[in-house]
Image (cartoon, grey):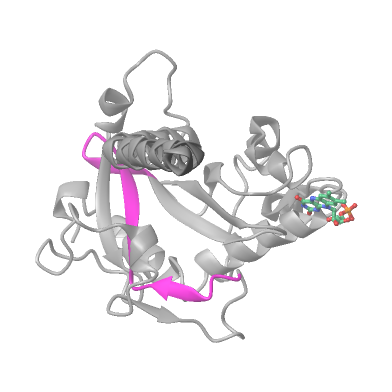
Amino acid sequence: MARDSALKPFYSALLLAFVCSFLVSSASVGLHSRQQANQQLDRQKNILRAAGLYREGIPVAQLFAAIDSRIIDLRSGKFVSVKEINPKKFDQRQAVNNPKISHSLAKSTDIAGLRRLEDYSWVYLVKKDNKISQVILPIRGSGLWSMMYGYLALNSDLNTIRGITFYEHGETPGLGGEIENPAWQAGWQGKKIYNQSGKVDFKVVKGGVKTKGAAALHQVDGISGATLTSNGVDKLLHFWFGNYGFKPFLERMRRRINHGRTLTSLN
Ligand SMILES: Cc1cc2nc3c(=O)[nH]c(=O)nc-3n(C[C@H](O)[C@H](O)[C@H](O)COP(=O)(O)O)c2cc1C
């Protein structure tokens, strides 16, 4: 009897631990779909913000109706059919770890510190009068501490930046974390990524843009005290708008738009 009572606190603690772990794990499982829905909502908000289309108080789903979400093959730059990749099931973040639809990057190519690259990417087309007014592209790259995820919106010339947002990163608040600051992001509007010969000509400048005129159109201010994060942003831009990123898609789109193709006839 005496021995029973000595073990009682131990059994009680064990039972309590079981009950707590059961509650925590069922809450985590039960909330998983809601978490995913919230993440999706947050991404959609950031896509809209990059395009300057987000409006406080208007449901995101309503605003997002102006956007056509499509999947492209990054290598060919072509839109893929539903048969090839099912958009309902395609998760770009998970695709990076699926060897069937991603590949590792050679060090010399991997300037943005991605390690692996998915074969397919989402692209978001803003429709206006059955024409494309903007294209919003998902971007990511290594900063000082973390992978930084964001979106960049291009105007219909597929070169001029409409906006940039970062929706997930682990950079230091107040330093690298300033990539989230709308004031810093505002400095990207109107800047151009490619030069006249179609090469990426863009720089995130330490200490701020000093040049004037045409050269300044291809530069944005670096973040003071966060040169390493700024360099990461510079590199990710070079990667995503280069040959391994969206360049094949943008060149293909540019040719099609120049030939008078409307949005519905794009393939
Ligand atoms: C605690 C701590 C956190 C830091 N976080 C960042 C950061 O998020 N991004 C960054 O570029 N530099 C960060 N730095 C500073 C870098 O180590 C480095 O000094 C800085 O990038 C140099 O930028 P500057 O030449 O503009 O001063 C941090 C430094 C410390 C001590």
For the N terminus, which image quadrant? top left
Which residue corresponds to the image point at 26% horizontal and 47% vertical from the top-left?
Answer: 69
For the C terminus, which image quadrant? bottom left
Q: Main secondary structure of the magenta part?
A: strand
User: In the figure, residue 4 lies in which quadrant?
Assistant: top left
User: In the figure, residue 16 lies in which quadrant?
Assistant: top left
Which residue corresponds to the image point at 43% horizontal and 19% vertical from the top-left?
Answer: 55
Depth order, front residue of 240/11 = 11
User: In the figure, residue 58 lies in which quadrant?
Assistant: top left
Check if residue 132 falls in the magenta segment. Answer: yes
Which x, y percent locates residue 134?
39, 43
Residue 180 in view here: yes
Which x, y percent locates residue 252?
33, 67
State the residue lying farthest toward the top. Answer: 57
Which x, y percent locates residue 6?
51, 40
Q: For this view, does 206 lie left or right of residue 257?
A: right
Depth order, front residue of 73/98 = 98
Residue 202 in view here: no
Check if residue 115 falls in the magenta segment. Answer: yes
In this picture, is 144 found above or below 103? above
Which x, y percent locates residue 91?
30, 57
Depth order, front residue of 39/247 = 39
Q: Which span is picked out in magenta?
A: 113-134
In this picture, is 83 found above or below 209? below
Q: For this view, does 139 lie left or right of residue 79?
A: right
Which residue corresponds to the image point at 74% horizontal and 45% vertical from the top-left?
Answer: 172
State the residue lying farthest toward the front. Answer: 1
